Amino acid sequence: MIYQHIQGAKVPALGYGTWQIEGDTCREGVEHALAIGYRHIDTAQGYENEDQVGTGIKNSGVPRDQIWLTSKLRPDWFDADTARKRTEESLSKLQTDYLDLFLLHWPNDEVPLEETLGVMREFQDAGRIRHIGISNFTPTQMRKANDILRVFTNQVEYHPYLHQRFVRETAKDLGMLVTAYSPIAQGAVLDDPTLNEIGAAHGKSAVQVTLRWLIQQDDVAAIPKAASASHRESNFDIFDFELSDDEMKAVHALEREQRLIESPYSPAWERG
Ligand SMILES: NC(=O)c1ccc[n+]([C@@H]2O[C@H](COP(=O)([O-])OP(=O)(O)OC[C@H]3O[C@@H](n4cnc5c(N)ncnc54)[C@H](OP(=O)(O)O)[C@@H]3O)[C@@H](O)[C@H]2O)c1
């Protein structure tokens, strides 16, 4: 495993994403992921699978303190009363005393950021949220949040086809982790000639090259989703090779401003 060291914490750079995996498939996926070595799990209230993630963690037998567990507060639950109630609910569904990381899932201008982050701080002061983060925040919004409290990460769409240069520069400036979601562009990297060519030189697939490229960067974590066990296994098989500087540059050069994820809460990225 590669770890990223941020603000005194040690984060497994490769995590397991659980969006669109529900029920027994989710529980079994988490159990399997932990059995084969994953130690970082990403869920969210909006994924409606926190129960199964919590049960999967319990069933795995892996001690809680060896797992990095992230969840996210839904943007329509940002007012203080709801945020408080729903954060308690996440802890209870996940069957844990604390979250390693809790994120504001999308920016929501209808509620002052101070109000929601104030609740997050209450939980942090009580030791129930170790680190507070944001997701889908623009560089300007990252700075605004970090002016209120120390923000640990911005979780954003990041893969070879979306460069995220400005988010990465801002994160570096503020000492934050960048967490890459949709890291393999939801499968779009599979047939990429450049990624396949680099992979052939290492005996690896285009997906493995992509994940390696992400976690080999300073202060970047990646959370690929895989409902299938074979995908989970091959995505974890990226710790026995290294990309050269030229190969890293060749993957960066694939960017084409291709954004896959939109939501009613999507910020105006072009205005930064
Ligand atoms: N913060 C946010 O707003 C946000 C938004 C989107 C995603 N996320 C997080 O990021 C995670 C990953 O993002 P994502 O699910 O959008 O996309 P992704 O991880 O880039 O791609 C997932 C897709 O790729 C397939 N796949 C996985 N490994 C593969 C492999 N080795 N070979 C071939 N295909 C493979 C999966 O298939 P199978 O599932 O069939 O195995 C699935 O169809 C989510 O689960 C979630 O935790 C966060």
Image (cartoon, rainbow, N blue to C red):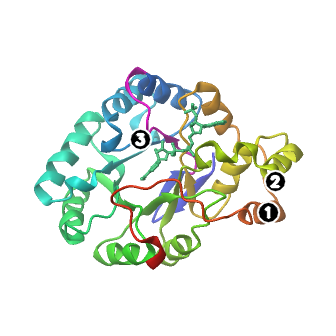
Question: Which quarter of the rendered picture does the N terminus lie within?
Answer: top right
Residue farthest to the left, as pictured: 81
Comparing 232 with 186, the one in front is 186
- In terms of depth relative to the viewer, which is nearer, 175 or 80? 80
Res 57 quadrant in image: top left
Q: Which residue is mark 1?
A: 250
Q: Residue at x 36, y 39 (%)?
A: 47
Q: Give the mark, 2 or 3, whose residue is nearer the N terminus.
A: 3
Tell whether label 1 touches label 2 (CB within 8 Å). yes
Task: Select label 2 or label 3 by which is in front.
Answer: 2
Secondary structure mainly formed by the magenta segment: loop
Residue lying at 33% horizontally and 72% vertically, measured from the top left: 145
Q: Residues within 10 Å of mark 3 (few under 14, many from 20)?
A: few
Q: Which residues are magenta?
A: 13-24
Residue identifier under label 3: 65
Is 257 within the magenta? no
Label 1 close to label 3 by CB (< 8 Å): no
Residue 154 visible in the current orientation: yes
Q: CA distance from mark 2 to mark 1?
A: 8 Å
* Whole-percent x, y for residue 213 in the image: 70, 55
Q: Is residue 137 left or right of residue 121?
A: right
Q: Nearer the viewer, residue 40 or 194?
A: 194
- Can you say whether 253 is above or below 211 in the image? below
Task: Reply above or below: 40 against 13.
Answer: above
Residue type at tag 2: Thr
Judge left or right: residue 73 versus residue 222.
Answer: left
* Residue 17 point in image, percent of width and height: 49, 41
Q: Is residue 91 left or right of residue 134?
A: left
